[in-house]
């Protein structure tokens, strides 16, 4: 009973590598509250999802992304 | 440990922020200094990129803005800790991060940037459309409402005036 459609992985489809400096792309996988979206929401494959979380955290350290929405 | 030494130098990427209390020229000299620190340790700098002044996502040590600079270099693994330490001690670098990177040629780098740009533009276009539709609907409703309200007000005014004049007559 799996009603969820499996989306295509953004990084696999566009043949991009996850980059913590590419904030504009990272933005689409972040909540309004600047939270990292889970893999079933982003539709990213688990391999890239792991890279993505790492990249977002790196971007936060370098003040490229805010850790909170305020 | 012996394995990593045998494999030789590997590619690293250093991103650092120079605080905003320097001018752009001063910041560039600081960038050169930092690169000097890196090359002093026997690292070979392959690629540099100066991003210029950018707004920080959050305030760091009362700085709202900072000069970002990127630097890629090949070096031995054991040297990274030394570079990290010297940068952490220096007052001229607000924040820095050393990350292992993939070896890229200039052409590949340009390609990746192009792709990132394209995907970002696509994404922003997608985002814009629904917002416009949503924004258009409520305003249309509002104008209709306003018109109907105005009509009602006019009617009320007329009625009131009628009543008042009638009272005056009495």
Image (spheres, grey):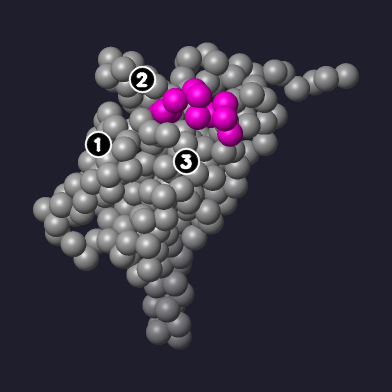
Marks 1/3: CA–CA distance: 25 Å
Bin the neighbour count of mark 1 within 10 Å (Cα to Cα): few under 14, some 14-19, many 20 and up: few
Residue drawn at 37 percent across, 62 percent down:
B89
Asked whether, in this view, residue A13 is left or right of residue B90, the answer is right
The span picked out in magenta is B1-11
- The quadrant of the rendering that contains the N terminus of chain B is top right
Residue drawn at 57 percent across, 38 percent down:
A54
The correct choice, above or below, for B158 with respect to B124 in the image is: below
Inspect the magenta stretch and tell me whether residue A54 lies in it.
no
Looking at the image, can residue A65 be seen? Answer: no
Where is residue B35? Give x, y as percent.
Answer: 25, 44
The extreme right residue here reads: A1
Marks 2/3: CA–CA distance: 22 Å
Point out the tag, 2 or 3, that comes first from the N-terminus. 3
Same-subunit check for callouts 2 and 3: yes
For mark 3, give the secondary structure. Answer: helix
Q: Nearer the viewer, mark 1 or mark 3?
A: 3
Inspect the magenta stretch and tell me whether residue B4 lies in it.
yes
Q: Which mark is residue B104?
A: 2
Marks 2/1: CA–CA distance: 14 Å
Q: Which mark is residue B78?
A: 3
Q: Chain of mark 3?
A: B
Bin the neighbour count of mark 2 within 10 Å (Cα to Cα): few under 14, some 14-19, many 20 and up: few
For mark 2, give the secondary structure. Answer: loop
Bin the neighbour count of mark 3 within 10 Å (Cα to Cα): few under 14, some 14-19, many 20 and up: few
Q: Which mark is residue B49?
A: 1
Where is residue B86? Give x, y as percent.
Answer: 36, 56
Looking at the image, can residue B18 be seen? Answer: yes
Q: Chain of mark 2?
A: B
Point out the tag, 2 or 1, that comes first from the N-terminus. 1
Where is residue B92? Give x, y as percent.
Answer: 27, 61
């Amino acid at each position: 009973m799996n009603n969820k459609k499996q989306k295509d992985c953004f990084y696999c489809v566009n043949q991009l590598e996850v980059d913590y400096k590419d904030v504009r792309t990272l933005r689409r996988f972040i909540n309004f509250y600047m939270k990292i979206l889970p893999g079933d929401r982003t539709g990213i494959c688990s391999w890239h999802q792991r890279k993505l979380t790492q990249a977002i955290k790196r971007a936060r350290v370098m003040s490229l992304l805010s850790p909170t929405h305020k | 440990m012996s394995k990593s030494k045998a494999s030789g130098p590997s590619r690293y990427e250093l991103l650092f922020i120079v605080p905003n209390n320097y001018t752009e020229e001063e910041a560039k000299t600081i960038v050169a200094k930092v690169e000097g620190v890196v090359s002093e340790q026997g690292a070979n700098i392959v690629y540099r990129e100066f991003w210029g002044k950018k707004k920080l996502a959050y305030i760091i040590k009362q700085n709202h803005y900072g000069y970002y600079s990127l630097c890629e270099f090949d070096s031995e693994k054991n040297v990274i800790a030394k570079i990290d330490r010297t940068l952490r001690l220096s007052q001229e670098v607000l924040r820095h991060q050393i990350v292992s990177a993939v070896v890229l040629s200039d052409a590949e780098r340009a390609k990746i940037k192009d792709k990132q740009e394209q995907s970002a533009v696509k994404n922003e276009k997608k985002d814009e459309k629904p917002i416009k539709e949503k924004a258009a609907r409520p305003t249309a409703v509002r104008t209709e409402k306003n018109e109907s309200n105005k009509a009602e007000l006019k009617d009320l005014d007329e009625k009131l005036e009628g009543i008042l004049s009638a009272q005056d007559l009495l």
